[in-house]
Amino acid sequence: MRKVPNNGNLRMTKVAYPLGLFVCLFIYIAYIKWHWASATQAFLSIPEVATGARGGQQSRSPPGPAAHGPEVFYGIMFDAGSTGTRVHIFQFSRQPGETPTLTHETFKALKPGLSAYADDVDKVKEVFEASPFLVGDDCVSIMNGTDEGVAAWITVNFLTGSLKTPGRSNVGMLDLGGGSTQITFLPRFEGTLRTSPPGFLTSLQMFNRTYRFYSYSYLGLGLMSARLAVLGGKEGKPAEDGAELASPCLSPGFRGEWEHAEVTYRVSGQEAAGSLYQLCARRVSEILRNKVHRTEEVKDVDFYAFSYYYDLAANVGLIDAEKGGSLVVGDFETAAKYVCRTAETQPLRSPFLCLDLTYVSSLLHGLGFPGDKVLKLTRKIDNVETSWALGATFHYIDSLSRQKSPTL
């Protein structure tokens, strides 16, 4: 795996590793700063991750009047998704000596995407060498899960005002993708720093402050990869001789097919003594045993949760599908017990719902979240997506400020 240049990259202390089903590309792009009297131009590098493009073109602005100041500048992000490329244009404004304010976001989704070249990163470099953007000699690389988690943490804390308001508590971030899951928060207790395993702590400098994170990406514990493991399959490998993958997490008598990572599996439920939930919970605990680190401090940190956490909660009515909402961790277990009990007597609209809810409940418990812990689930804050893209852009704006112009 190629290393990215030190100038402007997320300065992580841990060793990088690939993000499983996702590909992340580091590409030099334009960062343009306008003064009211005159304009100058500079460039910065922005990290990219395959997150799946969404169709259409949208323009979003946070509510309220745009901030006024002596300068307005833009960060442009190319998000190399698995089905397309999303181009983000973030408009910021800043008063002298203050943290920037996001005043506008625009993006456009294009298909096919740059991730079509994931197996040949030099092809991506060739694409950008033919573009108007400044392209360095070492501009394409693989992004690791910790970088993604930290960038998402920056996004959420920027949008909630934690980075702009001194003394305001920071929030943590939980993300559950298909191939991996991330947890990131800013520890306040010495015990967390002292007892965290190697590779779970990482540092980042931003706006004259050094942040030390508890951040980890569990490759193979994303919802789709975990589902395959619970079913007894192996990543990227068809079942031997086309055999069925039987699981106690599926309704007895159920038979069907499931496609994952371009492999189609035949799956079925099992007849066994005991309730479906109890049998499934036992199987999930076997998959998670010794796989996740439990930290007590999570019960004292406010957390936002995204991706499949949101989708599953919305699917069973725990939150509003459009607006999101809050729930307690125990709600996932309650929903799992209800769905699994229902699946014992009648077909589910989604045959994997019992498995998925049981897995999420067990995963959160394994990470140290008590049943009464409140989680906030949302897709947007102030009408801006809670993805890693804004956080990565925001960080690199600061990197450029420190490297190029101390007066920014």
Image (cartoon, rainbow, N blue to C red):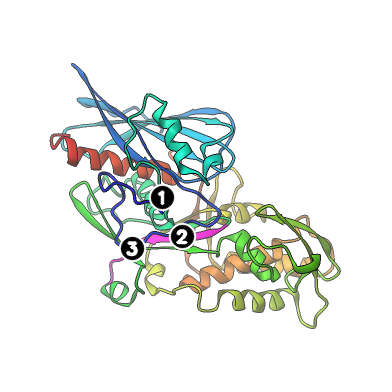
**In this image, 318 relative to 398: left or right?**
right
Q: Position of residue 358 (x, y in %)?
A: 64, 68
**Which is closer to the viewer, label 3 or label 2?**
3
- Against 15, residue 288 (above or below) is below
- Return the mark for residue 14: 3
To which quarter of the image does residue 299 belong? bottom left
Which of the two residues, 19 or 177, is positioned nearer the viewer here?
19
Mark 3 lies on a secondary structure that is loop
N-terminal label among 1 and 2: 1
Residue under the image location 31 percent in, 65 percent down? 187
Extreme-bottom residue of the structure: 273
Q: Amino acid at mark 1?
A: Ala
Task: Tell me which segment is drawn in magenta.
Answer: 179-189
- Return the mark for residue 152: 1
Which of the two residues, 169 or 311, is positioned nearer the viewer here?
311
Q: Position of residue 101 (x, y in %)?
A: 30, 35
N-terminal label among 1 and 3: 3
CA distance for labels 3 and 2: 15 Å
Q: What residue is pinned by disc 2?
A: 182
**Is residue 114 shown in magenta?**
no
Extreme-top residue of the structure: 37
Which of the two residues, 170 or 137, is positioned nearer the viewer here?
137
Residue under the image location 56 percent in, 38 percent down? 53
